[in-house]
Amino acid sequence: MKKVISLVLVFALAFSMVSMSASATVKTECQGDCDTCPAIVVPGIGQSNVWALDDNGDYLLDSDGDRISAFPAVVNVGSIVVKAIFPVLLTLFFQADIGLSDALCSILMDAFEVNLCDEETGKNTGNIEVEKYLYSVAECSDYEKEQIYNNIPLQDFAKQAGEDHLYYFAYNSFSNLENTVNELYAFIQMVLEETGHEKVNIVPISMGGSIANALLDYYPDVMDKLEKVVYIVPALNGSTIVGDLLRQDFAFFDTDFLYNGFLEALMDEEDARMIEVIARIIPDQVLTKALHKVADCLVNDIAGNITSIWGLCPKEDYPAASAAVLADKPGIKAQTDKFYQAQLDSLANIQTLVDKGVEVFNIVDYDVPMYLIGNSWNNDNADGIIHLSSTAMGVKSAIVGETLGDDYVQANTSPNCSDRSHNHVSPDKVVDASTGLLPDHTFYFDGQGHEQTARNDAIIALATRLLATDDIKDVYSVADFPQFSGRRDPRALNNHYIPEAKAVDPSTLSEEDAKELAEALAEAEAFVANKACYDGQQKEVEDRLVAILVKIGVREASVPEEPSTFFTNLSLWLFDNYGPNGFSEMPLLTIVNLFKAVGSLLGIE
């Protein structure tokens, strides 16, 4: 009997030790016993710190002693000057490509050296270090928290759920996609173990959407470990910018457009026109050759070997792009073909999530023109970086600047609309949300640019509420978060205009001014408090409050600088008279045009 009791005690002791050991790995206060699942942010391109290293593995430092970021490239001005000076001088002297395009390609390869990938395996070959956070935000240093919250300000979620329920999956944007997906899968297992929860929520943002595509396709078992998926501007079908890049369908190959429109779409017009004028020191044919050679180097020697970039290639562009770039790179193509299949399966996999009871929400921006880099820039509506049918899961929309028509009737093609009588057409008649996969669970923000998404307090508040509570079941749940809303960034209101207005003693004002200040202030406070708005409403509110602050002498009226137009006028004159030709070609063209003019006067064809 004593032996039996002893044996039982041994097993009991062993069991308790195992239990204690298991519980010791759980780091959450709730020990996994709370209603809020931990959230894992899968950020977008460039939202993780990646540092450049020297040959000894030490950080490269700038002149101020700060670490040098490897994203998107490391530019050494001194090296550029050394490599470019003689080819540029020779090209200008002989008005022919005397090593210029070769020098530009060499400079490009040097700049992207830290992000280069092997053309056989697609693995990184550069000296870099990814700043990873293999623990919850609760264990992060103040510096790490600042980095994370600057990218995705989910402080309110952390306050509600606890920082031990928030994780940030950092990765190299220019890396091997399959490795990143494998790391994310392992990261999810770690979070489950550390938090004691049986499920997690994931928040794929931008490029994180393409990584989520692969995660669901490569590891379908992960679906059973997901409670919620909250997509934010996800690249579920890449970006047409990347499709154009990999197919080398660049808008600037048209030199007429290069000298009149291309740069103006990307920067201040006067700066753009100055560059256009300076560029004319190189003959048109020489410049065209250099542009094509640099583009070929960028695609075939750099971007074409980075499988994470292929993860952003739209499925419509992949067959042609891969045939052109990866024909002699079977190792990389095998990986990108696998992701291409995941992209083809994307909507079906998301539907499987829904069918399994996973709550899937989507937050997207629209009606912002795509950066005019490739010729597909206006084939679809966009948020400036990603086209809308990619972020909004196949939704139908009008291109930027147009509408679907006043008489448009929604198509109701989604299988996931709970009530066919719902009106899913945007108030501006640009989007038919009934054609996207999740019409009841997709929130649209009109006029919101992709890069400013995290500064839209309504988007962050919406994401926080979706992750921290079960209040929002669809786009009809809360008045503050309707299906269609507008862009906003109330930092100026909160930090400047409203405090300044509150500090004014109304008794010192005329009755008329005091009334206007009170009404303008109330309108501004109501705008900040109510997250729903229409595009342009913030400007109206700010303009009204600033106007009264100026009138009563609290603020000075802003006087816009008279823009300089010297280079604009000169560039336009050159284009009108000489097209895309360089300065060296102009004398001959002037003579030809003069003979044509004389011939015309004399009636000679």
Image (tube, rainbow, N blue to C red):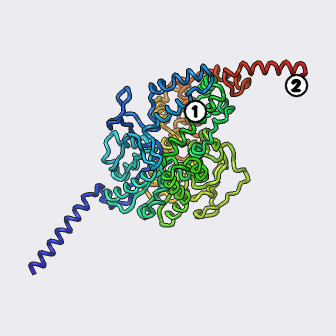
Nearer to the camera, 444 or 20: 20
- Viewer can see residue 486: no
Nearer to the camera, 282 or 474: 282
Q: Position of residue 146 (x, y in %)?
A: 37, 40
Amino acid at the residue labelled 2: Glu
| Residue in the picture at 65% in, 42% down | 375
Report the disc number at residue 418: none
Q: Are marks 1 and 2 in contact (CB under 8 Å)?
A: no
Dot 2: element: loop
From the image, tell me which residue sits under label 2: 605
Amino acid at the residue labelled 1: Asp
Residue found at the far bottom of this picture: 1
Q: Position of residue 592 (x, y in %)?
A: 78, 21
Q: Work out how far the residue at label 1 is from the one at label 2, CA to CA, in angstroms.
A: 60 Å
* 200 in relation to 117, above or below: below
| Residue in the picture at 62% in, 32% down | 289
> In this image, 332 relative to 129: left or right?
right
Callout 2: few (<14), some (14-19), or many (20+) C-alpha neighbours within 10 Å?
few
From the image, tell me which residue sits under label 1: 543
Q: Quadrant of the C terminus?
A: top right
Nearer to the camera, 526 or 396: 396
Q: Position of residue 195 (x, y in %)?
A: 32, 57
